[in-house]
Image (cartoon, rainbow, N blue to C red):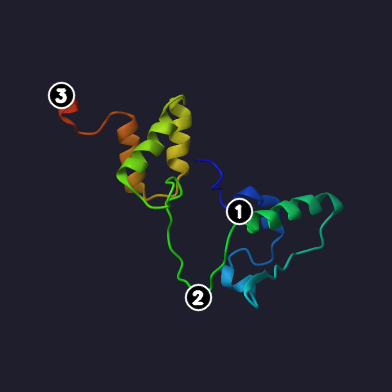
Amino acid sequence: MGGHEPLAEKFLHLFVLFEKQNCKVAKMGFMGGSSWEWAFVWRRNFQDWEVELVSAFLAELNNYSIRPSEKDRWMWVAGSDNRYTVSGAYAWLYEAVVGSSEEEIFKRVWKVKVSNKVGHLVWRLVRDRLPSGRNLGKLP
């Protein structure tokens, strides 16, 4: 579940120092031979204490591969093969619910970048508010 926080949130201090915060990745570097070269523009030079943070940021970027010849696409990061399945979504939700307080569950549900409709469905599922046969039998 964790580990997929947006870089702008994970490195907020550096994001504030970044000159072009709304820029697309394609404008943040270039292909240098067969590899991507980053060309960041910062508002100011770094303080000594920020160098370690910049180093961690650059190390994090090494986990991503930039392929300018490919179109961007969505990936389901909760699954082992990055493909969405209902059983994978169920396993992800189950992991989020087991051992978590209700407050923690809802923080996770609303933090996930999904449509409001999906978030509402998950909320109703966790609260046992879906119109199932069992729940419909509760009606007066």
Q: Are marks 3 and 1 in contact (CB under 8 Å)?
A: no
- Which mark is drawn over residue 111? none
Q: Secondary structure at mark 2?
A: loop
Q: Position of residue 22 (x, y in %)?
A: 58, 65
Q: Nearer the viewer, mark 1 or mark 2?
A: 2
Q: Quadrant of residue 26?
A: bottom right
Q: Secondary structure at mark 1?
A: helix
- Compute the Cα span from label 3 to label 1: 46 Å
Q: Which mark is first along the chain, 1 or 3?
A: 1
Q: Which mark is first along the chain, 2 or 3?
A: 2
Q: Residue at x 42, y 39 (%)?
A: 109
As shown in the figure, which amino acid type bears the numbered disc 2? Answer: Ser
As shown in the figure, which amino acid type bears the numbered disc 3? Answer: Leu
Q: Position of residue 134 (x, y in %)?
A: 17, 25
The local crowd at label 3, few if under 14, some if 14 to 19, many if 20 or more residues have their Cα within 10 Å, is few
Q: Which mark is first along the chain, 2 or 1?
A: 1
Q: Quadrant of residue 27?
A: bottom right
Q: Are marks 3 and 2 in contact (CB under 8 Å)?
A: no
Q: Residue at x 43, y 63 (%)?
A: 73
Q: Position of residue 28 (x, y in %)?
A: 63, 70
Please tell me which residue lies in front, 50 or 63: 63
- Compute the Cα span from label 3 to label 2: 56 Å
Residue at numbered disc 1? 7
Residue at numbered disc 3? 139
The local crowd at label 2, few if under 14, some if 14 to 19, many if 20 or more residues have their Cα within 10 Å, is few
- Compute the Cα span from label 1 to label 2: 23 Å
Residue at numbered disc 2? 69
Q: Secondary structure at mark 3?
A: loop
Query: Is 99 situated above or below 31?
Result: above
Query: Is 16 situated above or below 4?
Result: below
